[in-house]
Amino acid sequence: MLRIEKLHAGVKGIEILKGIDLAVPTGEVHAIMGPNGSGKSTLAGVLAGRPEYEVTEGTILFDGRNLLELAPEERAREGVFLAFQYPVEISGVNNSYFLKAALNAIRTHRGLDELDAIEFMGLVRERAKLLELDPALLSRPVNEGFSGGEKKRNEIFQMAVLEPKLAILDETDSGLDIDALKTVAHGVNAFRSAERTIIVVTHYQRLLNHIVPDRVHVLSDGRIVKSGGKELALELEEKGYGWIEEGVTA
Amino acid sequence: MIGGLGLGAGGLELSTHLDPYISACERLERERGAADPGWLRTLRRTAIETFSSLGFPGPRDEEWRFTNVGPIAETRFVAANDGVSRLTPQWLGAFGVGDIGPVQLVVVNGRYARELSPAAALPTGVRAGGLGDAITAEPERIGSHLARYATVEQHAFRALNTSLVADGAFVEIRPNTVVEEPIHLVFVSTTEAAPTFSHPRALVLIGENSQARIVETFLGPDDERYFTNAVSEIVAGPGAVVDHYRLQREGRRAFHMGSTCLNLGRSTSFTSHAVALGGEIARHDVVATLAAEGSECVLNGVYLAGGRSLVASHTEIDHAAPHCSSREVYKGILAGQARGVFNGKIRVRPDAQKTDAKQTNKTLLLSDEAQINTKPQLEILANDVKCTHGATVGQLNEEALFYLRARGIGLEEARSLLIRAFIGEVIERMALGSAREQVERLIATRLAELR
């Protein structure tokens, strides 16, 4: 269970999140939608512990632990995963070396044995197939020279390998063609389970045709202004965000 | 007394700084001058005259603007005596010098130490030993090479080294010889009660169509003040393929000035890896002359410094013949209040058409107070050439750091992953596994100290 209460956060003294209250029960998929600048990516970043954001008020409880007290790596080891909107190219760091280091850091934290090279490669090959990711990308530097679609698939592939308890997908659909979108959605759907919680942050409704959410929340100017079932996404698609924003100011 | 020295421009204060060196040169002449060939005595005399008139470089000397050698000039060093008797194999062993390979020549305080150089059979076609012995055995031959590549006219430290040349390491590889084992020259400095200086020298001759790996290591005690002023000359004959490593791992309080002077013949392929890890003030000059057509010179460099130390890398590539290429990548990491200097000179002579030269310098600053002065210097006198250069200075990429952490990798490990990735490009080019592994270990240790 993820429970966000009265969350205020910003960057360089400018408040972006102005009091978020949100509860996501374990096993559910919630979509967070909203226009540009509404604070969607800030919320995703704050959940993962992005250092430049300053939280001025509120709590984020995940399975009873206050995430705000944890460093980004500690959150990851507790099972939080952020699929980046803009995955970072890291030249000189091998993709599979990186993933193995990450997986073993998480496994060690959970009291599991580290995977050896053979076990790791077995797992990685299987999950790469699920995401239709070219295995050659594994031996390349992290995200370097990847196409936009490959980068996004690589994010979901990492999620499938690391098996987090809470996954936050930050505009994973942006820049994807329909085939890549379906592949990514397929990967996410395969990952859905009663133990896992997923937050899908998106500007558009189209990803939600393929990853059907349990709840949809609309973010506007740093607050959740409307929540509803999956049909809310369709309504937004039809009427645009203006309708919501007007409703708020009216 | 050496005739006609004159104290000239330097004046009295400067001359006192030079005194111990001039005395050492005079003593050398007194003690063994009579036994040395005439050319060697002339060489030393010319060199000490040059050193005396140049004096130690100051901040107004363009070549030394960012490399303040004041502390070297101001320290009253004494000539290091025979350090071999007090040197234990355990102490030397702790540096892991034996890991590089079985063929090892040890030079202590500039003198070849036969007793410390394992008597492993030299590979066929290789001659190696003391430079002093080689001068005695073949005076004309050595005289035709020694100090022909390491010019002294404009370089006080090379002049100083040359003014005291008497011994060191000598390696010769006969033509058409492929030497698999690396030949490791270990230059050890030892200290006494007072700060000591020594001037190690090496001459390496690689014959036509031969292939060799040469490793030079410079080391000394970690917490004592000493001054090593080294010069190595390497001549690669036509068609030779040479892989060269220079591991500067002096103690943290040491002063190190070093020159590597290369002369490349027709169609040679020369790769040099210069690693600078130690010293409070350390400067290394590579002077490479591409003397004949079709040669290729690759200069890789890695430098690390922390605290208040200074590390300077100067390279000077002289394209003196057509159809030669040079590739240069120097990467450094500076922490604390360390200062770095990179000066990359490329000269393309008028008839060196079709020259292809590329130079890159990248520095990673781990603190706000660390600094680098980087300067490319291109002097192109031919019209059909390709010369490029580039320099970057930056800090660890915060976004990359967060990306790694967001996947569960701890902050320290993430930082070290990114740092290793930064210099990985240069390390990976080290083809000699034993040297590469040692460099990786030394860098890891050094990085841990720098944080």
Image (cartoon, rainbow, N blue to C red):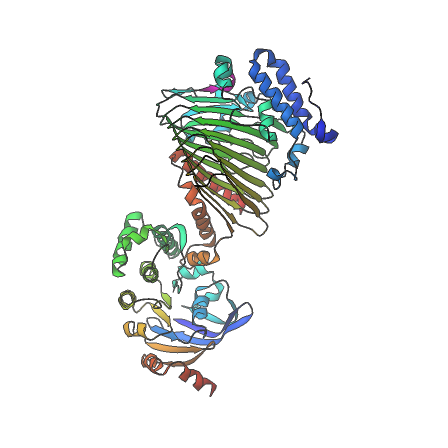
B168 or B260, nearer to the observer: B260
Image coordinates for residue A129, horizontal then vertical, percent = 25, 58
Image coordinates for residue A123, horizontal then vertical, percent = 28, 55
Q: Main secondary structure of the magenta part?
A: strand
Q: Is residue B35 visible?
A: yes
A64 or B263, nearer to the observer: B263
Q: Is residue A66 visible?
A: no
Quadrant containing the N terminus of chain A in the rendered view: bottom left
Image coordinates for residue B106, horizontal then vertical, percent = 49, 24
Q: Is residue B122 above or below residue B256?
A: above
- Total marks drawn? 0
Q: Is residue B398 above or below residue B426?
A: below
The residue positioned farthest toward the bottom in the image shown? A250
User: Is residue B14 highlighted in magenta?
Assistant: no
The residue positioned farthest toward the top in the image shown? B34
Q: Quadrant of residue A105?
A: bottom left
Q: Is residue B110 above or below residue B436?
A: above
Q: Quadrant of residue A2?
A: bottom left
Identified at 57% across, 52% down, the residue is: B368
Identified at 42% across, 56% down, the residue is: B404
Identified at 71% across, 28% down, the residue is: B8
Q: Which residues are magenta?
A: B128-132
Image coordinates for residue A226, horizontal then vertical, percent = 40, 81
Identified at 64% across, 14% down, the residue is: B30
The residue positioned farthest toward the right in the image shown? B12
B375 or A2, nearer to the observer: B375
